[in-house]
Image (tube, rainbow, N blue to C red):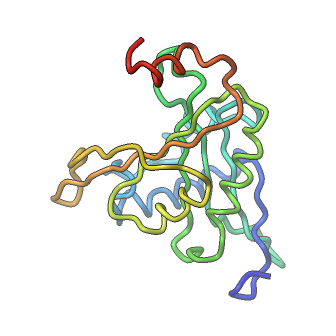
Amino acid sequence: MTPRGTAEPQVRPGIAEDLTGLTNLYNHYVLRTPITFDTVPLTPEGRMQWFLSHPKDGPHRLMVAAEPAPSGPERLLGYATSSPLRPKAAYATSAEVSVYCAPDAAGRGVGTALYTALFDALAGEDLHRAYAGVTQPNDASHRLHTRFDFRPIGTYGQVGRKFGRYWDVRWYEKELGGGGADGGAGRLHQTGRM
């Protein structure tokens, strides 16, 4: 049981029936926080392409945490994704990850459960690094990423403007098991040039 006395969240791959709930959860952050730099609420129809870009297998996944309900539909508590870092081919072994939790799910271990499931699912994929951009300040996200062996690698200063002010984004990096040959990266780290 969780600290609040409810059933443990179930983590599973996202399904099409989740799209409305996922969109509503995300729109909370769009409208009320600088955590995402989207500024206009999205619609489920507008997020369909995003949903389809996260299949149940492969390096780009969508994991959903849901709370079983004794009667009626389950309640979404959060989700985590791995997405392409950049569109150019050489970035294919790197992924950008993110996690969003329902506001009332804070402190229940939902983010930890989601990242655990996501990184377990990605373990056999051809991925070398995971990256996460975190709008500052965000102590809870810093703790979560540190717990999963991410390390801060730099900050984009005042990179986004929302709610009438500029926000910094700190970037985190995590080594993953896949990715094959280093493609010369070892040489770069040793000599400082390629």
Residue 2: x and y, percent? 74, 81
- Image quarter for residue 56? top right
The residue sitting at the left extreme is 164
Q: How many marks?
A: 0
The residue sitting at the front extreme is 190
Q: Residue at x 67, y 39 (%)?
A: 61
The quarter of the image holding the C terminus is top left
Q: Residue at x 42, y 18 (%)?
A: 191
Residue 165: x and y, percent? 17, 58
- Image quarter for residue 186? top right
Q: Is residue 139 above or below residue 159?
A: below
Residue 95: x and y, percent? 56, 34
The residue sitting at the right extreme is 70
Q: Is residue 60 left or right of residue 83?
A: right
In this orientation, which residue lies closer to the viewer: 148 or 112? Answer: 148
Residue 157: x and y, percent? 23, 47
